[in-house]
Image (cartoon, rainbow, N blue to C red):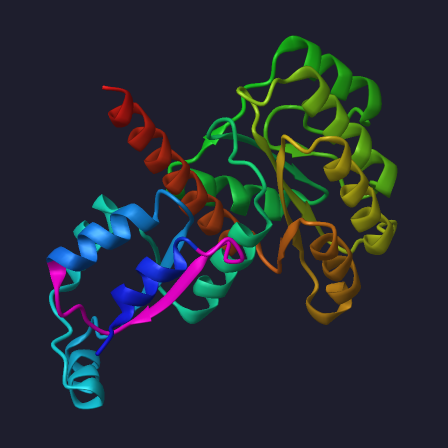
Amino acid sequence: DVDEVDFVEEIADDPETAILILYLESVTNGDKFFKVVSQATRKKPVVILKSGISPAGKAAASSHTGALAGDDIAFDLAFERCGVIRARTMKELFDLSNLFDKIEIMPKSDRFAILTNAGGPGIIATDAFEKCGLHFAKFNEATINRLHEHLPPEASVRNPVDIVGDARPERFRQALQAIFDEMPPEECAGAVVLVTPQSTTDPTAVAEVLASVHKSYPDRLMLTTFIGGETMAEPRKIVETNGITSYQFPEPAIESLKSLIKYRNYLQQCEENDDL
């Protein structure tokens, strides 16, 4: 005699629960769903994977639960209005859950830096930023000058920052410190760090450096991409253990960041409306 909305209502007030994730085929009472979930999303993130979006999927959902899957556009609009973070795949569902589970404070802005030791992934990340509507932090003169001090002449000190392929772990630290020291969180809320295994790279040591930087700057969000499959399992484990979300490729990291910023903006809008 209960449905998923009843569980959302109950768990939203559970102090031991940081995030709600749902697999959803249908909604039987739209008014109840909207009211309860709108209240829940103000308390903690609600991530939903909605299935049955194709004709075949709708038929499968109907035969599975006897429910009508409904119009996907309507769900999109409803989710957006009540602050739901929508996942499109099972992988994205757990990527988002992993990210939100590690967030202690919301980013201070929607502006971020990209730091990479390889030009190609940096360009891919830049394209993904543009596609997702995220904003690049605009470095001030002090930041640029300090980056010049620590990086080789061939490095790119504009955002995205390319510290070039021979970068050893300490160069990652110096670049991030230059950015975070000279840029307030309102102008640079954090960084997406891309690491590729090149001849002079020590990925495990880089992971330890990133963990140290993250600890020194708790008001900055850091997402990492360790490209290299299973060879990067240990570095990813190190950063994850230290509260930094890690991905294998840039695009999923930036898609997750997009959802985080969207949720941040939703909470901000709720606060502004409450003040009116």
Residue drawn at x 45%, y 62% as measured from the top left? 92
Which residues fall within the magenta stretch? Answer: 14-30
Q: Nearer the viewer, residue 117 or 136?
A: 136
Q: Nearer the viewer, residue 198 or 81?
A: 81
**Res. 83 in view:** no
Residue 64 placement, left or right of 174 = left
How many marks the image carries: the answer is: 0
Q: From the image, which quarter does the C terminus lie in?
A: top left
**Res. 69 in view:** yes
Q: Is residue 133 above or below residue 225?
A: above
Asked whether residue 15 is drawn in magenta, I would say yes
Residue drawn at x 35%, y 61% as measured from the top left? 10
Residue 216 placement, left or right of 185 = right
Quadrant in which residue 98 is drawn: bottom right
Residue 207 appears at what percent x and percent y? 79, 50
Asked whether residue 224 is drawn in magenta, I would say no
Residue 42 placement, left or right of 69 = right
Farthest residue in the top direction?
Answer: 141
Residue 108 appears at what percent x and percent y? 51, 27
Residue 49 appears at what percent x and percent y? 34, 66
